[in-house]
């Protein structure tokens, strides 16, 4: 049990973080009053993060030992919102009890298939999609089931989507691109945090806002994707490394830190290969370090701001030397999975 999480900041988590975060997300959505247009703003952020992860995933296919079909779209369902938010979600996002497309990444397989924001997905490969019970409390069950259905349908490389667009039904045929695993979810929250659990990357809205540009926002996303691409949670499990409260103890600290440094190193290559600015990456690490460094309270599982920036500078110099020499941008990893 307890698929552990490699965390971006100076914390590590135990257990099934994804479920916990989704639960927190659902709880968060319940009591907070929502300003008009707030959901639409979150959706814009969702779209940017989806586009960044899509670009990182496709540009780095050659570095990924375990590619998977890329969806290129996000789906939401009204049941993931608390009942008092549903009118807003319906108005702002066009949601209903049928799963609805809220983001289509430009240039993705979904875009090429003609999928549009606002399409209601009725069935995939002839199997109806699950529906929400509108009176039930907020739950991610349906949207998770829809995403799992889509992932399973795409395993053979394509899916037939039966959609309802403005009351007219049509079938769209979508071929999936193979790419690095790029399941990235935005989590509304005030903490600058990002994490990876082996399957999914979570990025807080505060961190996305703090990053500012897409070039900077790509940095933590690439770092967390690197943890999943390199299967760090599995490696640490195999080594019997404890996370959470035991992380700073014994052999745990050095092993976790090694994965953190490897993720930073690998992520710089991912950014370069995807055409993101390495200067913006260095600037992000500088700003992020200044804002979050724990100083003497750093438990040693993550490098402090100076060590992190030094590693980033060395990696950028290594990448630029390879670019100048016309060499391929392949990171040199010490440990293979
Ligand atoms: Zn990390």
Image (cartoon, rainbow, N blue to C red):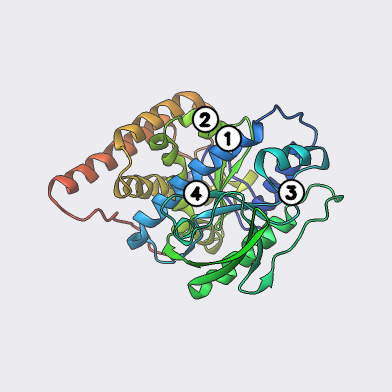
Mark 3 and mark 4 residues within 8 Å of each other at the beta carbon: no
Q: Earlier in the sequence, mark 2 or mark 4?
A: 2
The disc placed on residue 78 is 3
Quarter of the rendering occupied by the C terminus: bottom left
Q: Is residue 291 left or right of residue 1?
A: left
Query: How far apart, in angstroms, are the residues tagged by discs 1 and 4?
Result: 25 Å
Secondary structure at badge 4 equals helix
Q: Earlier in the sequence, mark 1 or mark 4?
A: 1
The residue positioned farthest toward the top in the image shown: 290
Say above or below: 111 vs 151.
above
Query: How far apart, in angstroms, are the residues tagged by discs 2 and 4?
Result: 27 Å
The disc placed on residue 256 is 4
Query: How far apart, in angstroms, are the residues tagged by discs 3 and 2?
Result: 25 Å
Residue at the disc numbered 2: 209
Residue in the image at 65% along x and 53% along y: 166
Residue at the disc numbered 1: 205
Quarter of the rendering occupied by the N terminus: bottom right
How far across and down, in percent of the image, does residue 101 sit?
60, 52
Between 7 and 168, the one nearer to me in the picture: 168
Residue 304 found in image quarter: top left
Q: Is residue 183 visible?
A: no
Mark 2 and mark 1 residues within 8 Å of each other at the beta carbon: yes
The disc placed on residue 247 is none
Residue 319 found in image quarter: top left
Mark 1 and mark 4 residues within 8 Å of each other at the beta carbon: no
């Amino acid at each position: 049990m307890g698929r552990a999480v490699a965390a971006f900041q100076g914390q590590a988590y135990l257990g099934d973080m994804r479920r916990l975060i989704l639960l927190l997300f659902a709880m968060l959505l319940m009591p907070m009053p929502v300003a008009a247009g707030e959901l639409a703003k979150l959706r814009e952020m969702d779209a940017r993060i989806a586009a960044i992860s899509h670009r990182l995933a496709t540009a780095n296919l050659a570095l990924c030992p375990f590619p998977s079909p890329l969806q290129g779209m996000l789906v939401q369902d009204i049941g993931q919102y608390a009942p008092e938010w549903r009118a807003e979600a319906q108005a702002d996002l066009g949601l209903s009890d049928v799963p609805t497309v809220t983001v289509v990444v430009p240039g993705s397989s979904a875009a090429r298939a003609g999928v549009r924001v606002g399409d209601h997905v009725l069935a995939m490969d002839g199997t109806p999609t699950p529906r929400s019970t509108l009176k039930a409390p907020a739950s991610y069950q349906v949207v998770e089931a829809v995403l799992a259905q889509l992932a399973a349908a795409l395993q053979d490389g394509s899916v037939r989507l039966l959609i309802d667009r403005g009351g007219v039904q049509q079938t769209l045929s979508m071929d999936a691109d193979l790419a690095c695993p790029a399941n990235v979810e935005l989590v509304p929250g005030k903490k600058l945090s990002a994490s990876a659990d082996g399957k999914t990357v979570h990025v807080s809205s505060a961190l996305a806002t703090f990053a500012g540009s897409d070039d900077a926002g790509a940095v933590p996303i690439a770092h967390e994707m690197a943890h999943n691409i390199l299967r760090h949670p599995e490696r640490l499990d195999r080594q019997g490394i404890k996370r959470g409260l035991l992380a700073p103890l014994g052999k745990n600290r050095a092993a976790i830190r090694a994965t953190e440094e490897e993720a930073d190193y690998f992520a710089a290559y991912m950014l370069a290969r995807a055409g993101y600015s390495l200067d913006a990456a260095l600037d992000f690490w500088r700003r992020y370090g200044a804002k979050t460094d724990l100083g003497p309270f750093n438990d040693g599982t993550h490098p402090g701001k100076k060590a992190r920036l030094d590693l980033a500078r060395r990696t950028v110099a290594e990448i630029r030397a390879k670019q100048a020499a016309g060499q391929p941008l392949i990171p040199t990893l010490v440990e293979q999975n």
